[in-house]
Amino acid sequence: MNKQHKLHWFLGIAAGAATTTALVVITQRQRTKRLALAASVNAITQRAIARLDVPAESRFVEINGLRFHTVQAGPEEGPLAILLHGFPECWHSWHKQIGPLVRAGYRVVAPDQRGYNLSDKPLGIANYQIDRLTSDVGGLIHALGRERAVIIAHDWGGGVAWRFAMDYPEMVEKLVVMNAPHPIAFARELKGNRSQRAKSWYMFFFQVPRLPEALLTFAPLDNARSAFQRTTLRAGAFAEDDLQILASAWSQPRAMQCMIHWYRAAFRFRPAEHNRVINAPTLLLWAEDDFALGKSLTVGLDKWAPNLTLRTISGCGHWVQNEAPDEVNAQLLAFLRARPTTLS
């Protein structure tokens, strides 16, 4: 080996060692940040609750052998409203709706759904199939001493809500879904609409083992910023405090894996019951500029939800209740007031 080759060999080894060292240092720093976020989740949660414009508190509820974290507010005797968040969120998804609902007289309960944030995270994809997710909602209603509730949901929470209204119709006073497709419309568009398949690319990526959760938890705060702030159309929808809450939820041990298991289970397990007509009064709120879900998903639902009212919000993206809270809250409260709910 001549001197030039030896020099190149030495430089190559040095460059490789420097790169490896840099990656180790970066990885360790991100791990330290992630652990710090995870450890501060209780303090972050309490600050977020204190910033709500109505009195509220954290409560843990036992459902189906699991421990669920909830944020509860409003008069104990008020009609019950259950708020179901989507992916990759937590109870805080509804912080702009909790106050208006409480002032309208509702007992509001916003859970972290199974696998999310401070709620239990059972192992295995099978624990996240849709029938178990809907059973959690029914169990929550009964654990709160009620028989019925208004169900308000967004994104994956909407997927649970549609199915819950099919399988537990006697427990649904009214149904409000925001930017979440009816399962029949979603299956139709995935099969026949190339544009929707392209928008749904992430669902297929999430079937890859381990890699998606590793990428999303490598730098939780930076990834939360990308996932939320950079995908909104209306400025100011997510403040830095909001991102910290979301990042701390992502940073909980096994949380991201369990959150993604919802998508994996959807590909592997079919609902036990056939699709049924939803007769409950239903409001579908749809932001027209959703980056993940096309407006074609709102077409042709009359057969499956004959009492459905569709309201669209223009110039607004997927995170509709955070991007357009005034419009969402006005539509939501008008719908709920249209026919008074029954106390149960």
Image (spheres, grey):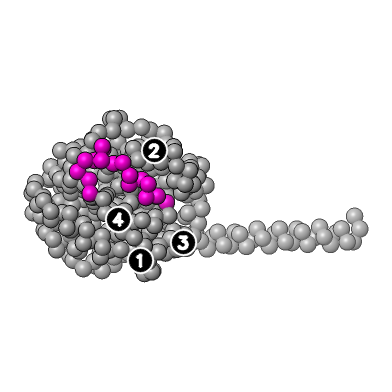
* Marked residue nearer the N-terminal end (2 or 1): 2
Which residue is denoted by mark 4 in the rendering? Answer: 312
Q: Residue at 8% x, 48% y: name it.
A: 342
Q: Amino acid at mark 2?
A: Arg
Q: Secondary structure at mark 3?
A: helix
User: Disc 2 and disc 1: Cα gap in Å?
Assistant: 31 Å
Which numbered dot is residue 50? none
Q: Amino acid at mark 3?
A: Ser
Closer to the camera in the image, 149 or 310: 310
User: Disc 2 and disc 4: Cα gap in Å?
Assistant: 21 Å
User: Disc 1 and disc 3: Cα gap in Å?
Assistant: 13 Å
Image x and y of residue 162, in percent: 27, 42
* Proximity of marks 2 and 4: CB atoms separated by less than 8 Å: no
Counting other residues with Cα less than 10 Å from the Cα at mark 4, is it few (<14), some (14-19), or many (20 or more)?
some
User: Disc 4 and disc 1: Cα gap in Å?
Assistant: 18 Å
Q: Amino acid at mark 1?
A: Ala
Q: Amino acid at mark 4?
A: Thr
* Proximity of marks 4 and 3: CB atoms separated by less than 8 Å: no
Which of the two marks, 4 or 1, is nearer to us in this view? 4
Which numbered dot is residue 237? 1
Q: Secondary structure at mark 4?
A: strand
Which of the two marks, 2 or 1, is nearer to us in this view? 2
Q: Residue at 11% x, 51% y: name it.
A: 339
User: Disc 3 and disc 2: Cα gap in Å?
Assistant: 30 Å
Which residue is denoted by mark 3 in the rendering? Answer: 226
* Marked residue nearer the N-terminal end (4 or 3): 3
Is residue 170 rendered to the left or right of residue 192?
Answer: left
- Any magenta on residue 172? no
